[in-house]
Image (cartoon, rainbow, N blue to C red):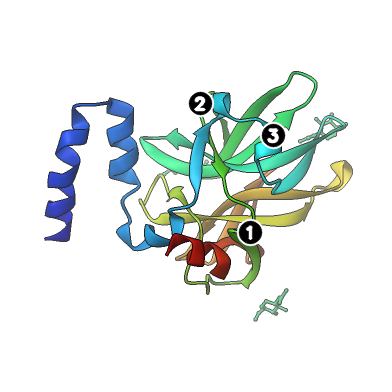
Amino acid sequence: MATNMLFIFLIPLLTTSGLQIKEKKKDIHPQFVPAQEKLKWISKNSVIPSQLIPAGRENIAGLNTILYVAKAMHQDQWVPGEAGFDEKNGIFYFHLVHNGTEFSMEHFVLLLQPAGTTSWQKMNGSITHAHPVFGGADPDTGEANFICRSAVDTGNNGTMLLVGRAVPSSGKCHLFHGKEYILSSFELLVVNAYGLARNA
Ligand SMILES: *[C@@H]1O[C@H](CO)[C@@H](O)[C@H](O)[C@H]1NC(C)=O
Ligand SMILES: *[C@@H]1O[C@H](CO)[C@@H](O)[C@H](O)[C@H]1NC(C)=O
Ligand SMILES: *[C@@H]1O[C@H](CO)[C@@H](O)[C@H](O)[C@H]1NC(C)=O
């Protein structure tokens, strides 16, 4: 019933843009909508780093890069990952992890969030917050995915604060730097009480 109604609602959108309809269809998960209204996902071409809230940092070939929350279309699905800003070339880059492999994307969107709207909450083995930031879905199962981060000791290249996707059914955070890290202890990006109040 609810699914049918959503489908009817989406039909007029079909006429506008193929990409847009894809986004709407895959991003439905209606239970997450109210808490997310103040959050915007902006194309990498329409945003500069000073508009964004840093989420992490990584070291690539000796260069320290600030990471931001982002998502990209992968196998017809929005999948959350991390965007870094390459200061030398003045451009954002993006990667996500799926099934142990890193995918780099040309086209992606970054999370634009009013100050005070979100915060990082510690999780250990399960997702226990009512309003995680919804970032997309698992490409294999379609399960909703949230945004997570954790400090990761990558060995020779040092400790980095990586940003990835949290999978509710496993309670784990998937991160990538050189290889995939699947962690039970991580921070989850959530819409906080102030952010919710602003949505009222
Ligand atoms: C790790 O650091 C080495 C030396 O700087 C570099 O060659 C290599 O690309 C780095 N690996 C990753 C995954 O950043
Ligand atoms: C995931 O990767 C493994 C090993 O690389 C492979 O055997 C498997 O088919 C992959 N699964 C999917 C769903 O792509
Ligand atoms: C997470 O939970 C496990 C198992 O209950 C526990 O051993 C571990 O100390 C916890 N870690 C943190 C960081 O709280």
**Residue position marked by numbered label 2 in the rendering:** 107
Q: Mark 1 or mark 3: which is in front?
A: 1
Say the numbered circle drawn on residue 129: none
Q: Residues within 10 Å of mark 1 (few under 14, many from 20)?
A: few
Q: Residue at x 31, y 42 (%)?
A: 24
Q: Position of residue 93 (x, y in %)?
A: 64, 28
How far is mark 2 from mark 1, CA to CA?
28 Å
Q: Residues within 10 Å of mark 3 (few under 14, many from 20)?
A: some
Please say whether residue 101 is visible from this viewpoint: no
Q: Mark 2 or mark 3: which is in front?
A: 3
**Residue position marked by numbered label 1 in the rendering:** 116
Which of the marked residues, 1 or 3, is nearer the chain's N terminus? 3
User: Disc 1 beta carbon < 8 A from ligand 3?
Assistant: no
Under mark 3, the amino acid is Pro
Q: Residue at x 77, y 41 (%)?
A: 58
Q: Position of residue 133 (x, y in %)?
A: 51, 57
Secondary structure state at the residue bearing disc 1 = loop
**Residue position marked by numbered label 3 in the rendering:** 49
Q: Position of residue 72 (x, y in %)?
A: 48, 35
Q: Residue at x 86, y 41 (%)?
A: 157
Q: Residues within 10 Å of mark 2 (few under 14, many from 20)?
A: few
Secondary structure state at the residue bearing disc 3 = helix
Q: Quadrant of the N terminus?
A: bottom left
Q: Mark 2 or mark 1: which is in front?
A: 1
Residue contact at pointers 1 and 3, CB within 8 angstroms: no
